[in-house]
Amino acid sequence: MLTIYPANTKTPLWLDLVDPTPEEQQRAEQALGAKLPTRQQTSALEQSSRFRSAEKLLRLNIPSFVRTESGQGMPTPLAFVVTPQLLVSVRYADSIAFDLVAKEMQSDTPPQDSIAVFVTLIEAIVNVGADHIEAISGNLSQLSQRVFADDGGQRKLLRGALFKIGRMQRQVTQIRAALLGVSRIVTFLCDGAPPFIGHDAHVRLRTVQADIASLTEFDQQLNDRLQFVLDAVLGFINNDQNDIMKVLTVITVVTVPPMILAGIWGMNFKTIPEYNWEHGYAFAWCAIITSMLVPLVWFKWKKWL
């Protein structure tokens, strides 16, 4: 899909291609006057494939860009081709950041040139990523509170908590990968931007660079919290398993003596004297019950129960 911003104009500032067809890519290349990267080229990890700068043309690639910047779904690449007159973006998934900037392009005060549109997109990507990291942090706090709650229903949460922590970890990892790609773009432009990147855009990029640095620190703290909650959940699960094994062990020990006595008295030998006792049956029951109670009293006295 090829979208032109502003719409209904002979001099567009931004061409947004979403999983473009060959015809749409050809139209964009004609408007740009240069070739656009293929998906394979955009996904390349080499530094030389990510950033290419010329006097009037700038090519920037993010190999791992998350769908909707939420960390959900498979990451897809993102490419920018920037000239002083036109910005072309090539992506292969929906994006909240791009939707926000598209709405801003239809507002009363849209960005006035392609460079401003590009910087606005970078800012939106970082802001949306930060919002999702904050949302994950809030969800993690709620989950942590429930995991450490001192109530009987807490045990039912543990299995589900593992899946939730795994999903959060995956989201954080993918958001980190996307922000890392944006960070490298911003660093590249701040250190050696081509002449057509003006002073105002340079100042805004420096601000974005500082925001990403603070997000990186927050992301590390969030990752540490995820690891702590994961260790706590696994610890609670191990404790529950130990409690179950303790109960099974007690049951086994308690039932062994009665089984031995029942096995002895169940043998078909006529010489067993208890068979001829007047109260032999009652004696057998008393012996079996006593053999069960003695281990239980012992465990209780040792405070093993």
Image (cartoon, rainbow, N blue to C red):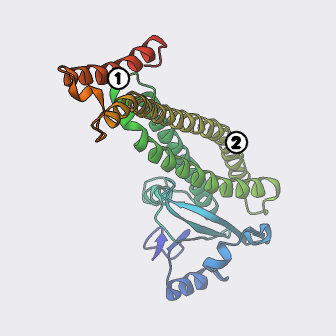
Q: Which residue lies furthest to the front in this view?
A: 271
What residue is rendered at 56% in x and 53% in y? 125
Q: Which residue is drawn at 69% across and 50% down?
A: 205
The structure residue drawn at horizontal position 46% and vertical position 36%, both measured from the top left corner, is: 241
Check disc 2 and give the amino acid type: Ala
Asked whether residue 301 appears in the rendered view, the answer is yes
Q: How crowded is mark 2: few (under 14 residues within 10 Å), some or many (20 or more)?
A: some
Indicate whether 44 appears above or below 129: below
Viewer-closest of 140 and 102 = 140
- Using the image, determine if residue 100 lies above or below residue 285: below
* Quadrant where the image shows the C terminus: top left
Quarter of the rendering occupied by the N terminus:
bottom left
Q: Which mark is residue 225?
A: none
Can residue 37 be spotted in the picture? no
Q: Mark 1 points at which residue?
A: 292
> Farthest residue in the right direction?
192
Question: Residue 220 falls in which quadrant of the image?
Answer: top right
* Residue position for label 2: 213
Which element is circle 1 on?
helix
Earlier in the chain: of badge 2 and badge 1, it is: 2
What's the residue type where badge 1 is placed?
Met
| Residue 213, percent from left and from top | 70, 42
> Closer to the camera, 14 or 208?
208
Q: Is residue 293 left or right of residue 185?
A: left
